[in-house]
Amino acid sequence: MANSAKTTKQKLSRKTRILNAAEALFAQFGYDAVTLRQITKLAGVDVALANYHFGPKRDLFNAVLERRADVLNNARHTALDECLAAAGDQPPTVDAIIDAYLGPLGEIHNSADEGWQHYLALIAYVNNSHEYGGEFMTQFFNPLVRRFIDALRLALPEADEKAIYWSYHYLSGALTLTFADTGRLDVLSDGSTSSSDTELGYAHMSSFVTAGIKAICAQKSP
C-alpha cells in the first residue's frame, strides 16, 4: 500500500506535487501558519523548486486557488446557461437558479477526491477571512456570482436589490460552513448526523436557501 502511494507520488510532476502539498497544508492550517519549507517537505522537493515555479508564498497561494477555480466556474456557468435556455422566453425560477448554482458544487464535493476536499476547505477559510476573502473571492468568483445575481433579478423583478444581495450572502455563508466540515454538526447532534454527509447537506441546502430567498425577497424593504 505504501509502495503504491509512493509510486503515484512519483508519477506526478514536481509542480503538481507542490500545488497538492500547499493546498492540503493551507486548508488545514491557513496561510500564515504554513511555510514554504513545510510545503516542499511534504511535496518531497527542494525549496528552491517552489521559488522557481511559483515565486514567493503569496504567489503560490494564488496559484493554488486559481488551479481549480476554473473547473468550478465553468461547471456552474454551463449549469446556468442550461437553466436560462430551459426557461426560454419566461424568467427562470428561483428553484432552477439555485439548483444550477449548487448542483455542480454538490457533485464535486460528494466525490471521493481528497484534493477537492482540501480545496473546498481552503475556499471556506478564504471566504471567512477579512484579509484574504475580499481580494481572492473577488478575483476568482465574483464574475460568476454576478451572473447568478442577475438571474435572480430576472426571477424576482419586484424584489428589493438589498434583499437579493443578502440572499446571496446567506447562501455563501451556508456553503462556507459546508465546505469547512468542522464536525460541529456531529457534536451538536450527538452523532445522529454528520457535516461530512454532503449529499444530504446539499439536498437540504437547496430547499432551505430557495425558500429563504423567496421569503425575504417578498418582503417590503425596511
Image: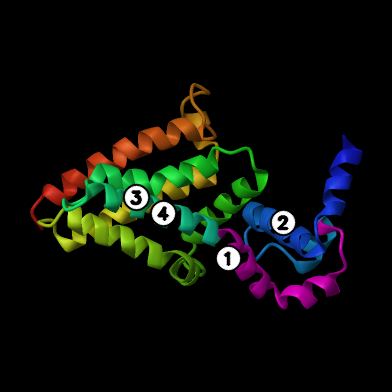
The answer to which of marks 2 and 3 sits earlier in the sequence is 2
**Element type where label 4 sits in the image:** helix
User: Residue 66's mark?
Assistant: 1
In the rendered image, residue 195 lying in the magenta stretch gets the answer no
Q: Position of residue 140 (x, y in %)?
A: 48, 67
Asked whether, in this view, residue 95 is left or right of residue 58, the answer is: left
Asked whether, in this view, residue 28 is left or right of residue 83, the answer is: right
The answer to which of marks 1 and 4 sits earlier in the sequence is 1
Q: CA distance from mark 1 to mark 4?
A: 19 Å
Residue at image mark 3: 82
Contact flag, marks 2 and 3 (Cβ < 8 Å): no
The answer to which of marks 3 and 1 sits earlier in the sequence is 1
* Colouring of the image: rainbow
Q: CA distance from mark 3 to mark 1?
A: 25 Å
Q: CA distance from mark 1 to mark 2?
A: 13 Å
Q: Amino acid at mark 2?
A: Asn
User: Residue 78's mark?
Assistant: 4
Q: Amino acid at mark 4?
A: Thr
Contact flag, marks 1 and 2 (Cβ < 8 Å): no
**Element type where label 3 sits in the image:** helix
Contact flag, marks 3 and 4 (Cβ < 8 Å): yes
Q: Which residues are magenta?
A: 43-68
The answer to which of marks 1 and 2 sits earlier in the sequence is 2
Q: Amino acid at mark 1?
A: Glu
